[in-house]
Amino acid sequence: MSDSQTGRAPARTVPREPAEDRGYAATVRRLSSAQKTTAPGSPAYSRFVNRRIGRYLAAAAHQLGMTPNQVTGLSALCSLAGVVAVATVRPSWAVAAGVAFALLLGYALDSADGQLARLRGGGSKAGEWLDHMVDCAKILAVHGAVLISFYRFFDLRWAAVLLVPLGYQMVESVSFFGMTLNDQIKAAHFASRGGRPPHPARQPSTFRSIAVLPTDYGVLCLSFLLLGVERVFLAVYALLFVANAAFILAASVKWFRDMAALDADGRQT
């Protein structure tokens, strides 16, 4: 999932590229000075690691003349490779390392496509649509692949364990949909009032970024490094599911209150 997973935030425009300053290092510097404003709820891996890796990949893609949609497609292919491996290959340490690498690379490219779009002067509605469609498919596919792997390769004591990836899939799908819907409703509300959603009143908290790490897609990708050890992976995966379920329950209450506040604001005008 891209940065949109944690809420969209306005980005500074990337300065126009001088003719004499078009190398890879110069492109990285230009991207560094024009990053998205960090949303308050951004988890630590996405905020401190994935966005930085995405910046380097975006600069490389720019040097190769790639378009943002091509980077999105490459992200989808990397994620697909990891998903297929989880579902079809018996877990081992080598498989685990390959799966984690493919999923993490796909995630980094998911950040790179938006950064490349800003570097080229701004994204498109078609590109945003494609990015969200790939994100949605990835959420469903990753947990579907885990379900298949559990069924085919894991020595499960209880069949009810198969409900864990189904529950995780539902939780992440609802979370992704909720965050996207929040963005759309807020944007429509402020547009109707002739303005834009306000910037965060305070700097994002590093403590909060660390506290919500279990909800970070990057952490889920990293957990696949343990795929070769059945009991350990199952325990970590189940704990991540519980943490994400607790988060969406708490977040849903806050989101509903945010929407009610928009209703109240609309009635005052």
Image: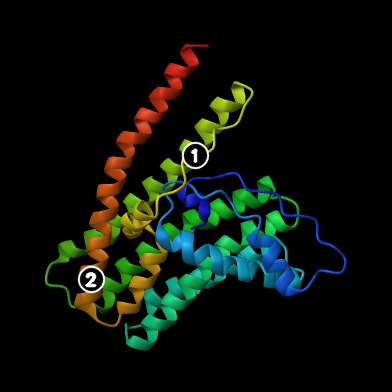
Q: Which circle marks residue 200 in the picture?
A: 1
In the shown orientation, is residue 116 left or right of residue 141?
right
The answer to which quarter of the image holds residue 165 is bottom left
State the count of labels. Answer: 2
Q: Name the residue located 47 percent from the left edge and 59 percent from the top edge.
A: 47
SS state under label 1: loop
Above or below, comparing residue 42 to residue 218 in the picture: above
Q: Amino acid at mark 2?
A: Leu
Please say if 92 is above or below 143.
below
Camera-side residue of 67 and 19: 19
Q: Nearer the viewer, residue 42 or 62?
A: 42
Residue 80 visible in the current orientation:
no
Q: Is residue 255 shown above or below 3?
A: above
Residue denoted by label 2: 234
Q: Earlier in the sequence, mark 2 or mark 1?
A: 1
Q: Residue 251's x, y, as percent? A: 33, 41
Q: Determine whether, in the image, residue 172 is placed left or right of residue 58.
A: left
Amino acid carrying label 1: it is Pro
Q: Secondary structure at mark 2?
A: helix
Does residue 224 appear in this view? yes
Mark 2 surroundings within 10 Å by alpha-carbon count, few (fewer than 14), some (14 through 19), many (20 or more) = many
